[in-house]
Image: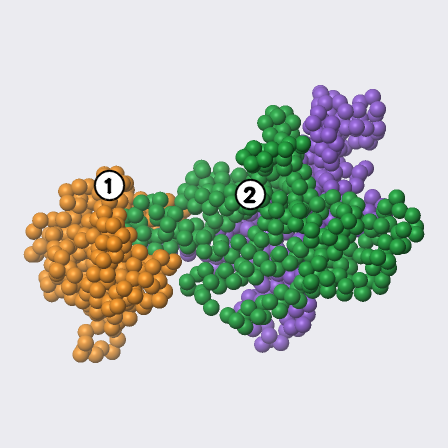
Chain colours: A orange, B green, C purple
Amino acid sequence: MKSLLKINNLSTHFHTEAGPIKAVNDVSFRIGEGETVCIVGESGCGKSITAMSVMGLVEGPNGRVVNGQILFDGKDLLQIGKEELRRIRGNDISIIFQEPMSSLNPVITIGKQIMEPLMLHQRLNKKQAYARTIELIELVGIPRAEQIASSYPHELSGGMLQRIMIAIAISCGPKLLIADEPTTALDVTIQAQVLETLRQIKEQSKMSMMLITHDLGVVAEMADYVIVMYAGKIVEQGGVVELFEHPKHPYTRGLLKSKPVIGQRLEQLYSIPGQVPNPLELVESCYFHDRCESCLPVCHTRQPQLKKSGDGQQVACWLYEEEAQYE
Amino acid sequence: MRTYLLRRCLYMIMILLGASMLIFFLYSLTPGDYVDNNMNLSEQRKAELREIHGLDRPIIERYINWMANIFKGDFGYSLAQQRSVIDLFQDYIWNSFLLAVVATFFTWFFAVVIGVLTAYKQYSLFDTLVMIGIFAAMSIPSFFIGLFLIKVFAVDLKLLPPGGMITTGSRAVGWEYIKDVLHHMLLPVAVMVMLGVGSLTRYFRSNMLDVIKQDYVRTARAKGLKERSVLFRHALKNAMLPAITLVGFELPGLFGGSIIIEKIFNWPGIGQLYMQSFTVRDYPLLMGFTMFIAILTVIGTLISDILYHTSDPRVRL
Amino acid sequence: MSIPTTTTHTARARSPVEASSSLWRQSIRQLSKNKLAVSGFIFIIFMFLICFIGPLFSPYADNKINPAMMHKPPSMKHWLGTDLLGRDVLTRLLQAGRISLTVGLASMALSMTIGTILGIISGYYRGIVDQIIMRTADLLFTIPGLPILFIMGALMSEWKVPTDYRLYLVMLMLSIIGWPGVARLVRSQMLSLREREYMQAAVVLGLRDRRKLFHHLLPNVFPLLIVIATLSIGGAILSESVLSFFGLGVMPPTPTWGNMIDAANNVIDFEKRPWLWIPPGLAIFLTVIAINLFGDGLRDVLDPKQKK
């Protein structure tokens, strides 16, 4: 499969008064054409920052991509100019955010907000853009499109707004759609509908998708390939079937264990002990070592590298490195 | 909304009643009025004048009369100028209004543009310089900066007229007249803008700082919009919303003129009229003016309130 | 996005457990990082020092009238020249500074005291007392400040108040204009504080009204008051200068910065002798800007909710 997006050694840091925070720390992966890649991890593990780095929207005066390559269609997004990147944003790569309620401008009508990228990137005139907007609203499964187009965001529900966000994101027929926790803020029943909409659209358009989530249920539904992140680093990645059937990293195993399974009643739901480490206090070690059930002496002092293990699966863990066993 | 407005109006009238009492009794406490101070009048003539204008009646009665007349739209009769206060207002108010409207327009224009840019470039050198400028503008004594600019531009450089609205003795009409007035307006407008732009810029800057952190601004960027439309279309629209309420508060300034500026620049406006009347203790006019400003202030507050409740699609009553 | 935001927040948020003394120390440390506020503070101290100590070292401090030295431009002997009575302008400027700064400080103290007391009474007892106080405040907001000050200034003139006393009356006048703003702020703080748990706990414990007031509430409004107090000194200095400039405030021979600028009302002094009126104007401007910079820095530190 040809890769659409290839990220090499990406590092994004935030400079704070207390020192630099390595939000994304030497991360590499690829997304093939038409593929759906899920990035999984607890909140604060750097998955959203990875997405924002791809968009070139790492915010604030303090955040900066310090190293790496983001190759999209063979072009390094970190090297091209701001203006060229702006033309790619919303056109070839688009994004859906977690909070639909606050992600739309409260004082501009829904219709105008969908029309904007159409007129900007596709050079449609007002009339064409409006016609396309109506089509898009219907495409994401909202009836009475014209009425919706002339309403303001506060008049719609969260689920509807997220569909509008999807409509905006797909309006220019992007090659890559990034969805950053698209269903987290929604009611459970609405979650399934929105995911279904996303999947249908993806199947029709053959675009690639980077889906960021902490919900393994969503991963199982949507993903072709899964990347597990912890404290800014990738700890394991692999095809969805292999990863779910043979999780290697203790963190992945913990995640899978803590997912409730219907029909299986337990006294207590499993949860990984301990807390995510303070990103300011990270030293050379496996960042997961103090929560790990099978921690080795070497885990305290050296960081494991991401290495191939089995069929296309990669894991960064000393348990799978032969030399480590003898140290 | 209806009952709310009704309650507001009732409250407004009460405040105005209170204000009128305060104004009236404060002025009538002051010994020595125009009649007293006028050396040219005989004792007999003074007594006659007092009787004509009801100045010899008990103070409560005078107050009631005064109030009743204000309700009828009659703000009293100026003894010094021998004309009704309302007529005098009509002569001077539009000059004040012209000055104030132009100054307000430029103040808002600069405040919005600078406010947006400083918020966008927060903590940059530009931002710091503007912040210092804002503090400077908020700390200038208005009469001093007026005098200083007159000294520099009118007295020393002779570029601009030192005061007034038209060149003395000028009979220019049409385009020439407009040019003459504009020429005279330049300095007072500049001073008024300087004095007002500081706090307003700060206000817009802080509003913008709040707004550009919002998720929808990130969405606008993610759509690939140009930074200009992100700032001036998406962000500014939201930052302007709370500012709409300020429009009402500008009202007393628009029609009430600026006492200090008009005095310093000898601008024939209502504030200048006030200062003139002050030196001759022309109380009917002074009371009328103060009451007039109080009414404008109350109405302005009401307008602000209504605008607040109607402008934001989210908080409509 | 949550990593950086949460950590910076926790780093900045102050834990309520911390002792109040360390809170102050922390505030001072934070304040000392704000260069503009620090330079403002240094300038204020400098201004106070030279105004109060400077004239002691001046050979012209007795203000003796010297007809031989009338209207001399700045020179080595008289750095800022002399005025129409041959007095040294620099010395007078510093002496005027004493008065102007004192008026600023005193009227601030007065309006803070009145405003705080009325605000606390208003916010604590509510009901009819609150209504009376707050409606009076509304009234004073409705009537424009300048005309009111002018009338009061005229009243003083008509009643032939001796010039020595005018100074004190000007302070009083400025505080009459100043207190409503303070009272409103204190009241709104009080209303929100009343609702907090520890106040309710105090009620449960049956503490007496007055103890509740002063032991629990004052320390909470204090930081806010310091900020308003600082900023209002600047406002008072400005208002005093306007009044005195128009001859309705403090009158000569008592010098203030405002009535020194009065020289500009004379055409010849205005056009030919700028040393008479530009220095006091600059003194007002620089002092007020320093106060505003410092006050704003204080606000950032002591009242982070207001920070924008």
Mark 1 lies on a secondary structure that is helix
Q: Which amino acid does label 2 sit on?
A: Ala
- Dot 1 alpha-carbon crowd within 10 angstroms: few under 14, some 14 to 19, many 20 or more: few
Is residue B181 or residue A291 the one in the foreground?
Answer: B181
At which x and y percent is residue C226?
61, 53
Q: In this view, does A171 lie to the left or right of B134?
A: left
Question: Compared to C266, does C9 lie above or below?
Answer: below
Look at 84% across and 63% down and name the residue there.
B58
Say how many tags the image has.
Answer: 2
Q: Disc 1 is attached to a residue of which chain?
A: A
Look at 25% across and 54% down and name the residue there.
A127
Q: In this view, does C267 lie to the left or right of A137?
A: right
Is residue A168 or residue A46 the one in the foreground?
Answer: A168
Q: Which of marks 2 and 1 is in front?
A: 2
Q: Disc 2 is attached to a residue of which chain?
A: B
Q: Name the residue under label 1.
A: A84
At which x and y percent is residue B213?
39, 52
Is residue A226 in view? no
Mark 2 lies on a secondary structure that is helix
What separation in Å lies between label 2 and label 1 (alpha carbons)?
Answer: 42 Å
Residue B103 marker:
2
Q: What residue type is labelled 1?
A: Glu
